[in-house]
Image (cartoon, grey):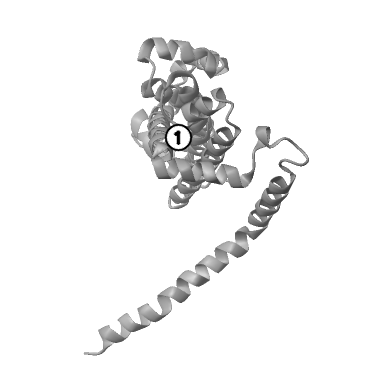
Amino acid sequence: MTSQPLSADLADTYAPAVVQAALISWVRRRWPPIALALVLAAIWQGASGTLFNAYYLSRPTAIAAQVWVWAVDGTLWRHLSATLVTTLAGFAGAAVVGIAAALLLGSIRALDRVLQPFVFVAYSLPKIVLAPLLILWLGIGSWSAIGMAFLTGFFMVFFNVYSGVRAVSPALVDTVTLMGAGRLRTALTVRLPAALPFVALGLHQGLVYAFHGAIVGEMTASNRGLGYLLVYAASDMDANGVLAALCVLAVLSLILLRLLALAIARQPGARVA
């Protein structure tokens, strides 16, 4: 009769201690970079206006104040959400198409010989030169930025997964084929599971490059997003705005990569070095 209230009391007693212990453990693991960042920020704050002109490099306190102003008036959340949607949409398309294309070309040698030169030519092109074409096809706005994110992320996913698919033991593939498995079943049950470490690496790099592509797309062909906010601040010669946008971009990229790493870590056999 009293066991349930007792367990609830114990939970109320020990839950704060568990949270506190986890927080202390996290700080202990992360304190060197945190301490270095605080020291550099202090040096920057002290040197601004004395060793260099604050007009060009501003101050950490002024940058934090700018981020706060954006957060209060809604500017930060409006552009942050736009960049997040652009990045995730481009990355999702790059992941699905990249993995499918890698499985297809890695499994069918004849198709690989025909299409491989075209893939390498497309990969060798600087993606920024495709911005005018994306604007022509998709117009100025979010779709052009999503297209840029997709293109930059696709090749990272494709080439990593393609390398993993081609690295699968031919003897294993021949054994499964002799047992009656077709190309599709072999690709999904043998090649793809064996290439999971390459898939994880491809997704990691694909997210980074999709994020880069989203920012470039917003800077060149959009009227919203953190990339647009960065260009807008630069056009006003606003060092506070430029550096504040860069700081927000840095934090957002770290959060996205950390979430992806946690998701990958939950999949057995898939690890990012």
Which residue is at 43% across, 52% downward? Answer: 266
- Seen in the picture, residue 189 relative to 126 is either above or below; the reply is below
Q: Position of residue 26 (x, y in %)?
A: 56, 62
Q: Nearer the viewer, residue 158 or 218?
A: 218
Q: Is residue 136 left or right of residue 53?
A: left
- Seen in the picture, residue 209 relative to 7 is either above or below; the reply is above
Q: Is residue 175 visible?
A: no
What amino acid type is highlighted by mark number 1?
Val
Task: Work out which quarter of the rendered image holds the N terminus and state it.
Answer: bottom left
Element type at mark 1:
helix
Q: Nearer the viewer, residue 47 or 83?
A: 47
Q: Is residue 179 left or right of residue 211?
A: left
Instruction: Specify the farthest residue to the left.
Output: 1
Total numbered badges shown on the rendered structure: 1
Q: Is residue 91 left or right of residue 40?
A: left
Residue 104: image quadrant is: top left
Q: Position of residue 61 (x, y in %)?
A: 60, 47
Disc 1 crowd, CA 10 A, few/some/many (<14, 14-19, 20+):
some
Q: Is residue 242 visible?
A: yes
Residue at label 1? 173
Q: Is residue 183 left or right of residue 167?
A: left
Which residue is at 53% across, 17% downward? Answer: 128
Q: Position of residue 191 (x, y in %)?
A: 44, 36
Instruction: Specify the farthest residue to the bottom.
Output: 2
Q: Nearer the viewer, residue 14 or 107?
A: 14
Q: Position of residue 267 (x, y in %)?
A: 43, 50
